Image (cartoon, coloured by chain):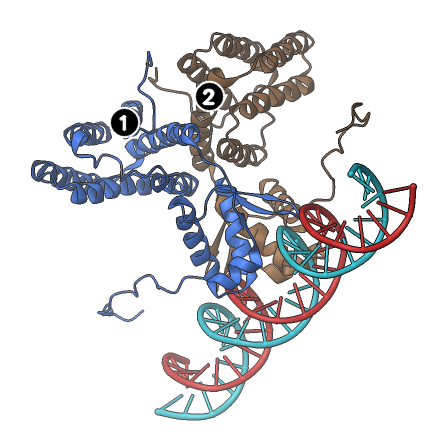
Chain colours: A blue, B brown, C red, D cyan
Amino acid sequence: MSAGAIPVEPLAEEETLSLGERAYRRLRESIVQGTLRPGSRISERRMASALGISAQPVREALRRLEQDGMVVTLPRRGTVVAEIGPERLAELGRIRAALEGVAAALAAERMAGEDLAELAGIVRGMRTATAAADTEALAELNERFHAILQGATGNLFLVKSLEALRAYDDLGRLRALGSTPKDMPKALREHASILAALRARDPALAEARMRQHVLRSLTTNGVLAPPRRDR
Amino acid sequence: MSAGAIPVEPLAEEETLSLGERAYRRLRESIVQGTLRPGSRISERRMASALGISAQPVREALRRLEQDGMVVTLPRRGTVVAEIGPERLAELGRIRAALEGVAAALAAERMAGEDLAELAGIVRGMRTATAAADTEALAELNERFHAILQGATGNLFLVKSLEALRAYDDLGRLRALGSTPKDMPKALREHASILAALRARDPALAEARMRQHVLRSLTTNGVLAPPRRDR
DNA sequence: CATGGACAACTGCTATAGCAGCTGCCAGGG
DNA sequence: CCCTGGCAGCTGCTATAGCAGTTGTCCATG
């Protein structure tokens, strides 16, 4: 309540997350990277001793993974890693495209000026990265673009669902969307056009462009089959 | 391995669910019905003793509710019921419309003939229910229509997400979509047209019609604001 | 009167122990 | 030889106990 502001930075997000959270991320990573094969059984006790923790956090992690659709629990039987084939990945990609579209529509309605400016900066960065053919930087910028847009919606359900869907990317052995050298110019144009729709505060247009962007990106990455007569 | 089939029906889904599952449903119901007000804190121990069980299943239920966006947990502080205002409900409605649209598209590609026949029977039932102005029966048929369609997609992630979204219906004090006497004829026509698109195996058309159906239904129920210049 | 610090009563979180149910093996009866 | 019943060894699931961290109160101190 005193006059002068205290000249310290707030503590960074603590590295020591709860064991349940860490177990959740570790298991999810192991699944999408293939260390835990589909069909293999996961025992709470065995996994707990393997991770050096108790069985409770492991159980909690398995429950969350079940809600994500990555494992399936047979009551009193066991927990097995779910089968996720190419067609399932394609379905998830279409769901993701739809959700990212809704996120873009909501962002077009609510997004603040500073966020728009930040997106503009990212697009500028994409332009230079594309000219330099720096796929690494482009992937990073792409992630930030989508993260800022989704964060601007302020919708926790949407953000969490998209985060869960994004986890499947590694499963298809694909890099971040839009980072393939081949479609870098396309991705750049698409991001710029999405930004333009956001600036114009046109929800329907932003949604259509974002959705098309994700669908095309997934198609060039081989997750989705080429469209036949869509639209 | 012997010749004759055993003349018994398989056991129905057991009524005795796990305590964690029951706690999850109970808490979710209490939240959407308003018994647990937004902003109120939920203690694992207190809630456990109130339910007559241990703290572990309650904690598990709270975790799942957190993933659903219904509660928010502050580490080492407590768990509070999330605020869900009208604009948040509207956002969830738009997400739901998009997901149901994707479900319809997937169903149009995969749906078997018997499921189509069942949907046709439901639409016929809707016709008679509409003529009799039986809102109760129509709500039941409407639920079955969407459940069959979503089940036909075979996508667990999609089904679970939509189930979580459907839980919010009671929060808006609204009955099942399409059961309002006013829009019964509209809902009937829309369901019939969706079925036609499914029969034609036209994913894009089925998606557009389903999405429009959900959006219109949510609009007439007051969840969404009337569109200004969409489509 | 204002202020700061210690203490008590919470909280989420983790570990341990033990329950009931399922599975697979294996011996014993047909 | 085949089949059936019991018995370990697993599994998920629940309860209890105790940890560390947060919060609010109350008293001693300036």
Q: Is residue B161 left or right of residue B25?
A: left
Q: Residues within 10 Å of mark 2 (few under 14, many from 20)?
A: many
Q: Position of residue D25 (x, y in %)?
A: 54, 76
Tell me the subunit letter for badge 2.
Answer: B
Which element type, helix, strand or loop, lies under badge 2?
helix
Residue at the disc numbered 1: A206
Marks 1 and 2, how far apart at CA = 24 Å
Q: Quadrant of residue A197?
A: top left
* x and y, in percent, of residue B204 in the image: 40, 15
Determine the residue positioned at 35% across, 37% down.
A172
Q: Is residue A227 left or right of residue A181?
A: right
Q: Is residue C7 above or below residue A55?
A: below
The quadrant of the rendering that contains the N terminus of chain B is top right
Q: Secondary structure at mark 1?
A: helix
Give the amino acid at mark 2.
Leu
Given residues B12 and B36, the one toward you in this image is: B12
Q: Are marks 1 and 2 in contact (CB under 8 Å)?
A: no
Q: Name the residue at 46% across, 21% down.
A: B106
Q: Position of residue A61 (x, y in %)?
A: 50, 53
Q: Is residue B116 above or below residue B170?
A: above
- The correct choice, above or below, for C5 with respect to B68 in the image is below
- Tell me: A128 left or right of B125: left
Q: Chain of mark 1?
A: A
Q: Residue at x 45, y 48 (%)?
A: A36
Number of dots carrying numbers: 2
The image quarter in which residue A98 lies:
top left
Residue at 11% across, 40% down: A129
Q: Amino acid at mark 1?
A: Ala
Q: Which mark is residue B106?
A: 2
Whether labels 1 and 2 share one chain: no
Closest to the observer, D12 or B30: D12
